[in-house]
Structure formats: C-alpha cells, structure tokens
Amino acid sequence: MKELVFLLEEESAKAMLESLLPRILDAEIQSRLLAFEGKQDLEKQMMGKMRGYLNPHARFIVMRDQDAAPDCRVVKDALRARCADAGRQGVALVRIACHELESFYLADLAAVETGLGINGLAKHQGTAKFRNPDSLQKPSKELLTLTKQRYQKVGGSRAIGQHLDVGNERSSSFKNLIAGIKRMEQELLGLAA
C-alpha cells in the first residue's frame, strides 16, 4: 500500500490536512494523519511510531510549528535527527510552520473569508502585514483579531483547509509543505505496486 503518514503537533493541523489532502493527493495514495498533544508529545512519541510502522512503503511527513524557537532550522535539524534515529532517514520529511499554522491561513485571506463566511477579509491581503505572514510572531492572535474571534483552531482549520489555494506562495512554509507533499507523492507513485 502506498501510504503517506503525517505526524502532526496538534489536531488543528490534522483538521486542515483532512480537508486539503483530498484535493492534491493522487487517489492511489492513502494518507494517515497522526495528531499529537503538542510539540513535546510529538517529539516524545514520533520515533516509536516511525520505528513500529509496519508498511515498508510508507513515507513520513513530520510537521510542527516554529512557535518561539529563534531558528526554525535548529528545530528542523533536531526532528530530522529523530527521523534518522528511528531508521526512517530518506523516507521522512520535516516541515516547520513559521511561526504557527495560522500563517498559512493569513497568506490566503480569500480562503479564510470563504471558509468562515466572513465578508471583506480578502481585501486585507495587500497590506504589508499579510503579504509575508511567516514573519508574524503570533499569527493565531492576528487571525483572531481579523475574524473578530470567530476563528476556532480545529473547526476553523477544517473550514479554511477546504479553500486554501495550493499554488499560494505568500507563506514560504506553506509553499514548502505543498512541495514536500508533492515530492513524497511522486516517490510513492514511482514505487512498484
């Protein structure tokens, strides 16, 4: 079975991917989304989950927020080392949301507007703040303010994920996530059945 396994920091990332992946993944590929209870839980359990995974054709994507870490490369390198220690080097990819998952949403205010049913949000996309949302320290707070507290992490992520433009490049971390998913998809499709 051709399977792409996501190890995720939280339920909101799972909710977003549940509504995004069916639009971008080939039907031949199964996706499995494993959400943990925060970054410490992810880091504590990921090696065991990866080591114990029985499907030899599975590919893994580990995804977490940068949050307050000063350098996302340090976070990424530490997670890559865990993947290697689990024996999954070469079949695992690490993606970091700069600074939070919500930066993906702030990069696509049309998706937020449509997903949450709030008129007038997309017009803010041209402002300096939302042209490069990866630079915002607290995107979740910005999104709450912009939506007048209507955004809820899990439900909002599910609703917005259905409408995210996969070609959107305003968030480098979102662009890199999509490119990574596509790369893993091509690797899986290249495997003999």
Image: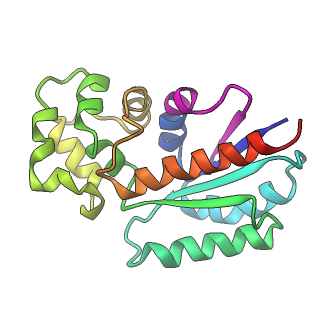
Res 32 quadrant in image: top right
Q: Residue at x 28, y 46 (%)?
A: 107
Q: Position of residue 95 (x, y in %)?
A: 53, 59
Q: Is residue 69 visible in the rendered structure shown here?
A: yes
Q: Residue at x 18, y 50 (%)?
A: 130
Count of marks, rendered view: 0
Give above or below for 62 relative to 18.
Answer: below
Looking at the rendering, the stretch of residues picked out in magenta corresponds to 18-36
Res 173 quadrant in image: bottom left
Q: Position of residue 148 (x, y in %)?
A: 16, 35
Give above or below for 151 relative to 159.
Answer: below
Q: Nearer the viewer, residue 126 or 137?
A: 126
Q: Is residue 36 visible in the rendered structure shown here?
A: no
Give above or below for 97 relative to 4.
Answer: below
| Quadrant in which the C terminus is drawn | top right
Q: Position of residue 69 (x, y in %)?
A: 41, 74
